[in-house]
Image (spheres, rainbow, N blue to C red):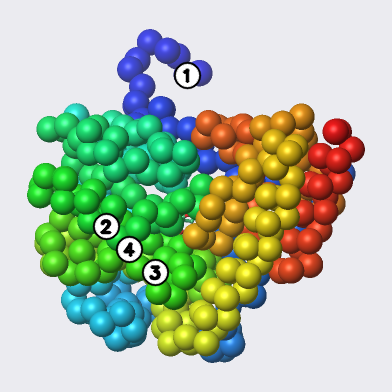
Amino acid sequence: AMTDTHPNPKPWIADIHAYVPGKSSAADGQPLVKLSANENPLGCCDAARAALDEQRDPAAYPDPDARVLREAIANRHSLDAARIVCGTGSDELLNLAAQGFAGVGDEVLFSRYSFAVYDIAARRCGATPVEVADADYGADVDAMLAAVSPATKVVFLANPNNPTGSYLARPEVERLHAGLPSDVLFVLDQAYAEYLAQDEDDGGLELAAAHRNVLVTRTFSKIHGLAGERVGWATGAPGLIDTLNRIRGPFNVTQSGQAAATAAIDDADFVERSRAHNAAERARFAERIGALGNYGLRALPSEANFVMVLFEGAVSAADALEAIAGAGYAVRHLPGQGLPHALRITIGTAEQMDTIADTIAALVGSKA
Ligand code: PMP
């Protein structure tokens, strides 16, 4: 029998909170429609679908350097393929960025109410996560710069941000970067960048091309509709890319993931259709929530493929979550992230958004 008389292996993960996935079924066990994971309601493009349906040799390892995919990404974004690394989703690359540049005794900085992986990535490498106060649910550049210490090694910024949808325009992103010591790694997470208005750009790719301390991460999980294939990429200076290459899994992107992503990046029409659908439905949904302002509801401005709704009146977010589940939908409640009063709702089809808005309106009306 095991006894407690010997020292036990002590994992870093002792102080990492387990990832809690959103609910996927109702109380009666019925599956819910997921508007909880920021997936693309239009699916993926036909070319990616066709690439997924091709026969491959499952006994063969994928290309460890994802050469064809990196060339396609480089072409699409006018980048140098040598400055691109692909990952098992951008999640892997965010973790590798922390692991490569921070360790025990170091600090990893990010804004409150930002992507939950940053905290986990910091703790995974033994570093200390430093959560900076937000400015009305968005990143506060002055507060972030004030929080930088000699121990700071990595700064994460999601732009647009998950779960709030907030966005820092280019001058603010540049001001944040300019205020950081040059030996601090600035990781600009652009998972939702393709959802920005067509004339909007935070300048991240240019920063990454021009400076040795900027890493931009992107994903095929959101607008390209390939979340299940787990493909992300990062670009930055050769020294940064070399570090990530040396610590990543050698075969970290599957054959099908590489093929589907390569097909998806060239389908500009699908991306534009997804972007336009999202922008239209996001505006329509935000307007419907805005009309419920008298009941203490507020839709935070969003540049992403979801809207965060605050419930500060008689109806709580938990009440709304339950009513929405009753209507057959899962949305995201994040009480563990300090947001017990909010729901993050992914933009789905027009019909789905009508159902969610109708459900919320009926609930607040009935409690008024
Ligand atoms: N960054 C942000 C801000 C995200 O919201 C997500 C997805 N939840 C990711 C990165 C990671 O996505 P993936 O690993 O699928 O690329």
Q: Residue at x 52, y 41 (%)?
A: 19
Q: Nearer the viewer, mark 2 or mark 4?
A: 2
Query: Which numbered mark, 1 or 3, is in the foreground of this view?
Result: 3
Q: CA distance from mark 3 to mark 2?
A: 12 Å
Query: What's the residue type where badge 1 is placed?
Result: Met
Amino acid type at image mark 2: Pro
Q: In which quarter of the view is residue 122 placed?
A: top left
Q: Of marks 3 and 2, which one's residue comes earlier in the chain?
A: 2
Residue wearing tag 4? 202
Amino acid type at mark 4: Asp
Q: CA distance from mark 3 to mark 4?
A: 7 Å
Mark 3 crowdedness (10 Å alpha carbons): few <14, some 14-19, many ≥20 = few
Percent coordinates x, y for residue 224 in the rendering: 51, 74
CA gap between label 2 and label 1 equals 59 Å
* SS of the residue under disc 4: loop
Residue under label 1, please give it.
Answer: 2
Q: Earlier in the sequence, mark 4 or mark 1?
A: 1
Residue at 54% across / 74% down in the picture? 275
Residue 171's tag is 2
Q: Describe residue 148's horizontal placement relative to residue 276 as left or right.
A: left
Lower position in the chain sequence, tag 1 or tag 3: 1
User: Are the residues tagged 2 and 1 within 8 Å (C-beta)?
Assistant: no
Return the residue at label 3. Answer: 200
Whether residue 108 is visible, yes or no, is no
Measured as percent of width and height from the top left, residue 100 is found at 21, 49
Foreground residue, 35 or 356? 356
Specify whether 137 is left or right of 118.
right
Categorize mark 1 by other alpha carbons within 10 Å: few (<14), some (14-19), many (20+): few
Looking at the rendering, in which quadrant would you find the C terminus?
top right
